Image (tube, helix red, strand yellow):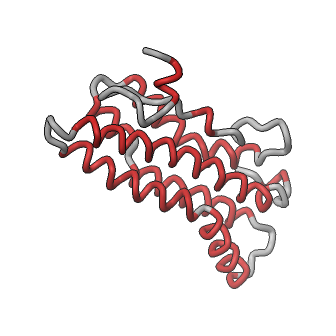
Amino acid sequence: MEPDRVRDPSQVEYGELPELTRALRALGSPRRSGGSYQSLFFLPLVDARKRAAEARGAEARVRAFDTAELSRALQHSIDKIVSSWPDERPSVRRALRAELNERVGTYASALLILSERAAAALSADTDARLGAWRAWTMQLAATFDAADRSWMSLRSVVDTLPLRRQP
């Protein structure tokens, strides 16, 4: 495996995973980075990447990134932030939830596209499978990047929460 090629999701061979976690610049950031909220946000994606790396075969690698589960985990992260918000008025919490969903919109959209690319990769015939695989890996890399950017946007909200209220 050539390291430069594997870093580029458009150049991987069928069944190979590109480098993904380098896109997560915010993960483990030394600044006040949201503590357990950051873990709650990134852990499902990092765990899926670990399962995919350990999987045998391209189909198992695609299935390791269960986009429905990743979407549920994203909403769970938002739920935790909202429930920890110091102002408990329902109108404030609704507004906060709407704001947080807007801030993670690129990640949520990336997950939807990843689901479409996964379906195409899993159903591709022999002639189209490399192209479908690369389209999926390119979207997978874009999803990791979108998660990173979404966390950076959420972090300014999370950093205003009282430390004692973190999950």
Farthest-out residue, top: 1
User: Residue 92: horizontal and vertical position, in percent?
Assistant: 73, 80
Foreground residue, 135 or 96? Answer: 135
Foreground residue, 97 or 58? Answer: 58
Foreground residue, 140 or 13? Answer: 13
Point out the image quarter for the N terminus.
top left
Does 6 appear above or below 41? above
Does 7 appear above or below 139? above
Q: Which residue is at a point 70% across and 73% down the rendered structure image? A: 96
Q: Which residue is at a point 71% across and 58% down the rendered structure image? A: 154
Q: Is residue 92 left or right of residue 135?
A: right
Q: Which residue is at a point 41% across and 39% down the rendered structure image? A: 137
Q: Is residue 30 left or right of residue 152?
A: right
Choose top left, top right, bottom left or bottom right for residue 112: bottom left
Farthest-out residue, bottom: 91
User: Residue 121: horizontal and vertical position, in percent?
Assistant: 26, 43
Choose top left, top right, bottom left or bottom right for residue 13: top left
Q: Is residue 47 left or right of residue 115?
A: right
User: Residue 12: horizontal and vertical position, in percent?
Assistant: 39, 28
